[in-house]
Amino acid sequence: MMEKLIEDVLNGKVKMHELDNILKNSNSATYVRRRVIEKLCNVELKHIGSYSIDFNDVVGKNCENTIGVVQIPLGIAGPLLINGEYAKGLYYIPLATTEGALVASVNRGCKIVTDNGGVNVRVIKDFMSRAPVFSFESILDALEFLEWIDKNFNDIKKIAESTSRHAKLIDIEKYIMGNNVWLRFKFTTGDAMGMNMVTIAVDRAVRYIIENFPKARLVALSGNMCVDKKPNALNLILGRGKTVIAEARISRKYLEEKFNIKPEDVVDIVHRKNLLGSAYAASYGFNAHFANIIAAIFIATGQDVAQIVESSMGFTWAEVDREGNLYFTITLPSLEVGTVGGGTRLPTQQEALKILGVAGSGNPPGTNALKFAEIIGAAVLAGELNLLIAFARNELARAHERLGRGK
């Protein structure tokens, strides 16, 4: 049957996306599609076809038209001492990457920070947003609509929250431009990153709004003021997902003895590279390489990798404290992560989350995602600090030659 199906797909009698329904088994459908691609492209997909995933658990949740997997090396950094509200103690950080020197860099940063008392970290905001856009015949209708939303907030909240036991509507921000209105719905979403949860909740709320305020015309359920998967000033300033701040102090003596540099050297690089250079480039976020660490953790733990765009926006600050030591801090305004749903269901990603002690739902719900956000914030600080020390020692290129080119 398999060989006949392969020929039927090649001859155009069967479409590849139909195979799951025909075979009633996505593992078999994956095999047939892979064999079709091998024949069409004249390639052997031996490694893409080697995996431990059950595609019956993937299709319909994570991916379609599956042919196999892509493997990425997974490294570990740590231990990292974290002094968070939810993350307390020593943690090992799983990092999936193809960039030589990255894991080594974060690993050395973990040691530096841990040797000096660890990272203090807190989540100061926690919400997920979706912002539909509406149009009106006139600005008078639009302004009337804004008043109506305020008066009916409790009813809208009840309707939206009926779609999930975890979605809790905390605010509706209102934005108007001409005869267009954006409603930025903000929810807490438990341990889920929550984008799908919020989309479903807002869809239900919008139906109620249109039925009861017929002057409003829905243009799009997402009006790009959410803001999802795009670099933007709104999330940079107001936040989305988890807003995380982390800090560490590194003693002057430690920097001088271990690295032959001073706190002032790191501060100077932060000011001239991260702040002035980023300002001159009009960058959304003033940092050295937040995206490196966040991308590696996202891939390892099954996060939505497209949200690295806004999750890696952020700021590094450094100064010499009153005792002459290095005070170092990072801020992530829009870290969008979860420990349930999406790619966190995948078996290897589940194991990576277990390394961190955050797999699945927390007790109470929401605490695992907050703990996870604290861990990421601490890891970003460690990786950022080490890179700036590498710049101060002018060892960046040598590290990449040794660990990125094997020299």
Image (tube, helix red, strand yellow):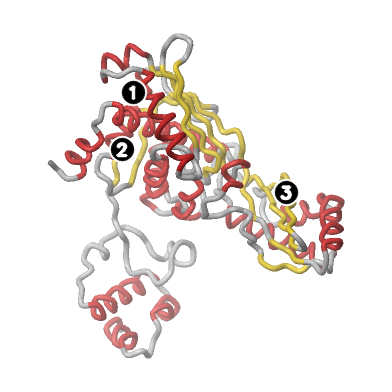
Q: Is residue 108 above or below residue 150?
A: above
Residue at image location 29% in from the left, 52% down from the top:
72
Q: Is residue 363 left or right of residue 14?
A: right
Q: Position of residue 179 (x, y in %)?
A: 77, 63
| Residue 225 seen in render | yes
Amino acid type of the residue that numbered disc 2 sits on in the rendered structure: Ile
Question: Helix, strand, or loop for circle 3?
Answer: strand
Q: Callout 2: helix, strand or loop? A: strand
CB atoms of marks 1 and 2 within 8 Å? no
Q: Examine the rendering and report whether any part of residue 338 can be seen.
A: no
- Spatial CA span between label 3 and label 2: 41 Å
**Near-viewer residue (214 or 83):** 214
Q: Which residue is mark 3?
A: 173
Please name the residue that numbered disc 2 is placed on. Answer: 76
The residue at 45%/40% (across/down) is: 278
Q: Which residue is mark 1?
A: 112
- In the image, 172: left or right of 237? right
Quarter occupied by residue 44 = bottom left
CA gap, disc 3 and disc 1: 42 Å
Q: Which residue is farthest front?
A: 280
Quadrant of the image occupied by residue 277? top left
Image coords of residue 404 (percent x, y): 21, 44
Q: Is residue 176 left or right of residue 386?
A: right
Q: Which amino acid type is shown beneath numbered disc 1?
A: Ile
Say which quarter of the image contains residue 241. Answer: top right
Give the residue at x 67% y 56%. Answer: 131
Mark sitting earlier along the chain (3/2): 2
> As displayed, is residue 269 above or below residue 350?
above
Amino acid type at image mark 3: Glu
